Image (tube, coloured by chain):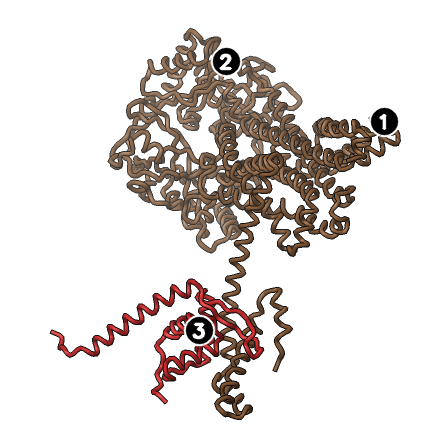
Amino acid sequence: MRDPSWRRYLRFWGPDVGSDVDDELAFHIEMRVDQLVAQGMDPAAARVEAWRRIGDAEALARQCREIDGARLTDARRREWVHGTWTELRVAARQLRRYPVLASVAVLTLALGLGATTAIFSVLYAVMLRPLPYANADRMVRITETMRGVETSVGPGQFTEWLTRANAFESVGAYLPTTFSLTEGTPERVRAAFTTSGLFRARYVKPAVGRYFLPEEDQVGREHVAVLSYGLFAQRFAGDARVVGRPIRMNGETYTVVGVAPSEFSIATPGDQLWVPLALTAEHKSTFSDHWLTVYAKRKPGVTEGQAQRDMERVSREIAQLHPDDMVDRSARVHDFHDDLVADHERILTTLFGAVGFVLLLACLNVTNLLLARATARRKETAIRAALGATRVHIVRHFLMESLVLAASGAVLAFFVSRLTLRALLGLAPAEIPGLDLAGQGPATAVFLAGTSLAVAVFLGLLPALRGLRSVEPTLRMGGRTGGATSTRDRLRNVLVVSEVALALALVAGAGLFVQSARKLNEVDLGFSPNGVITARVSLASSRYPTPEIVQRTFLEFVDRLRRLPHVVSASANSTPPLAGGAVGVDVRVEGRTYAPGNEPDARFHIVTPGYFETARGRLAAGRFFSDRDGAQAPLVAVINETLARQLWPNESAIGKRIGCCAEAPTPWREVIGVVGDMRQFLRREPLPELYLPIEQTPPVSWTWHGNSLAFVVRTDGDIADATREIRAAIAETDATLPVYDALTYDERVKIASASSRFSTVLFTVLAGLALALAAVGLYGVLAFSVAQRSFEMGVRVALGARPIDVLALVTRQGMLLVAGGLALGFVLAMGASRLMASLLYRVAPNDPVTYLAAVVLLVAVGAVACYLPARRASRADPTTALRA
Amino acid sequence: MAERVELPQGTLETLILKTLTWGTMHGFGIGRWIEQASGDSLTIEEGSLYPALHRMEKRGWIEGEWRQTENNRRGKYYALTTEGRRQLKAQSESWLTIVRSVGRVLDTSKQPS
């Protein structure tokens, strides 16, 4: 018989389920034996009988233990929850006793969390949000490549892909365009020609009606249209009866067959309607022109690598059939989603990294505050431990406090992030896809909650460990808060050094963006943008059937615009500067032959006489076009300096003869002038360019531009007045012509530099925030250390130290931290800035001037943060300090 | 000895609750008391008594506490909780209702119309 009496002491640490059950059954046996003996049974026989009655004692004990085990787990969990809740309330109450510390901490966290959440919601909307298509992960874009450089796809190649490629469920071609929708007030709508395969690849149910049928890809069947939900709602009042109705576009009749759902898009968002792409037999046998964008959907189970190899095989097969057209050509398969966000990925991840730095800084700062408090509360912690709080209890206590802080910060951060997001959206470049969805859906809230929780753990852990470690020495010291122990100071110093390092990295980053923005502002556009308006008009071929009529109409328009009261001069250009890429053409040079695929190429422009004068381009050599360069006059051309340098590096281009546009036999055109480079894209170096006068341009070039030209008009007065006059003047001639894409050059420059401005402003704000946080952190550590060392300072002063000595002592302590931080931050910034090299314009990521400026700024801010506590220390009155 | 009967499911718990209204008692005592109160027509098996006690403790109807007995043994005594009292009231009412209803049906001499 075991003696259980000692075991009751085990209960001190909690119930012991196993032995409790055994004891209870043993007690039962004893009682039964007593009873049986009392009835006259022999004690030994009674014991046997007692056990017999119980039966399988082991099974019974096991059953009871199982029940008890479940009960105790429940009870423990309840107790834990209750205890945690109590701790939570205690923590909230304690923080309320330190309102300044609590509000500084909560505010700091709210700023850090709010900014991070706002950037995250943009990042999520643009990059991580699942696309609204079934099997979006199998969507791809296929391009042709020419010596490894991607090009658009030829209609011939596309037609071959349809039958030869095995890796795809559906393949479709896409060609963006615009239509004049003449229902009521004429309106230019963004549209696209698409083959029916595209809708199959993107399949999401249409909102109303249907998508295109395969047979509608044929010439003669293609006069149908699918509306975007936006156009349907806005232009047709969301009336489903529009399906089946005819609409007039570009002077022709199309039947509406369906409406796409609201978030539907094929390439980038913004298409307002779609029309079938009907390739003619001639198109289908054209392998030398490349103007299609092709999207496809991989078959299930086919990897990207397999799809790529399949397309390479198809390209080799086509090359055997059309060797001349396929020199150095192959194809490349891209993931659709990666492709869509590729341009914006770098800027968004960089910003997210930067805002992550700020959040980390905020956390370090709050940790510093809490550490200071944990130090001040060593006595309290020691007493808790002495009264039986376990390590787990103490850690929980600190964690609850940081949880309260983080949770309050998170609530505030929610509003901060809303405000920040609104500011961000106002600033962000409009072309980022999916931006309008930022902040919607549960992802942002989940992110905020998760991040806040992580922050709470981060904040609580250091003070908690510190609290644990301080239990013993404090008790030994009898609870007296004496001189600072060196380890604690070291930890807080490490925090401050990290803060300075992070701040330096952010300030340097902001500096690089500011430099880059300045360089972008200084770019020589090659023309004088002030007071220039551009506005585009396109002449539907049903009403303006021949190139001669189109040319005459545009010249009449220019003439009319020239006579407007606010207009200084007027002209037209098929693709004016900063208004998107111009069409590329192969250039031939008289007397030279180039290997196939090696011809020089240039960007092609149709211009009216007076264009260069209106834009105020620089004449580098020869002359500009004049009215004499008419249809019957000798053929002439103007090229830009880049093309001139490329074709005739060591001689004058004037008088040389060139051809273009795949005309056969080549009509040679004499180069009569060289114009200084004008920027097609703000951030890209000038491209080689070729200009032809409007009356001499090859007829095919009108189809490249959809019979459209952009008027380039210089005004001397009010821009809005002038724009209104231009619209009125054009409506006077033909009221069905919409004037679209009307922008001033100030606006175009603003659009082109939007992404640079976006990163510059954001980085500057984040760097300012970081600087302030680091300064506060540095100040806090020094002020605390000065307060703790007031006794020591008193002794020093009593022994003859002058105020300036004390000042130097404290300042040196602070500046040593700053120096450490700068060294660390320099390494960090050098590493991190390399990642944003592609976002910078003509600034090296290790630009020494920027780094020097950042270091100077941080030293200055650091000096101020050191000076304030140092001055206080130097004024210490030895008597007060020593008596305290 | 009187005729032995099997206890219907769940009845044991009601009887335990009733027993404990007289005061705290250990498992052996509870079993003995029920047997005696039934005039020894009920036998309480240890194999069902102890699991029932532990189950009821888990539900919070009774509470166990270790105590010294008169002859200096340590036994686990069970006491009724407030929730236990409530359970007893509800269970005995429904039990009596069943007994009365079943009895009335068995006793009836009228043929159903």
Left or right of residue A82: residue A241: left
Q: Report which quarter residue A561 is drawn in.
A: top left
- What residue type is disc 1 on? Arg
- What residue type is disc 2 on? Gly
**At numbered mark 3, what does the secondary structure look like: helix, strand or loop?**
helix
- Is A226 located above or below residue A673 in the figure? below
Q: Colour of chain A?
A: brown
The chain to which mark 1 is attached is A
Q: Which residue was labeled with disc 2?
A: A531
**At numbered mark 2, what does the secondary structure look like: helix, strand or loop?**
loop
Left or right of residue A325: residue A213: left
- Rate crowding at label 1 as few (under 14), some (14 to 19) or many (20 or more) other CA atoms within 10 Å: some
- Is A320 located above or below residue A193 in the figure? below
Q: CA distance from mark 2 to mark 3?
A: 94 Å
Residue A574 location (% of width, % of height): 46, 22
- Is A396 located above or below residue A259 in the figure? below
Q: Which residue was labeled with disc 3?
A: B52
Q: CA distance from mark 3 to mark 1?
A: 83 Å
Task: Point out the frontmost of discs 3 and 1.
Answer: 3
Q: Colour of chain B?
A: red
Q: Which residue was labeled with disc 1?
A: A802
Please say whether residue A22 is visible from this viewpoint: yes
**At numbered mark 1, what does the secondary structure look like: helix, strand or loop?**
loop
Residue A701 location (% of width, % of height): 44, 26
- At x 34%, y 65%, the residue is B90
Total numbered labels:
3
- At x 68%, y 35%, the residue is A777
Q: Earlier in the sequence, mark 2 or mark 1?
A: 2
- What residue type is disc 3 on? Ala
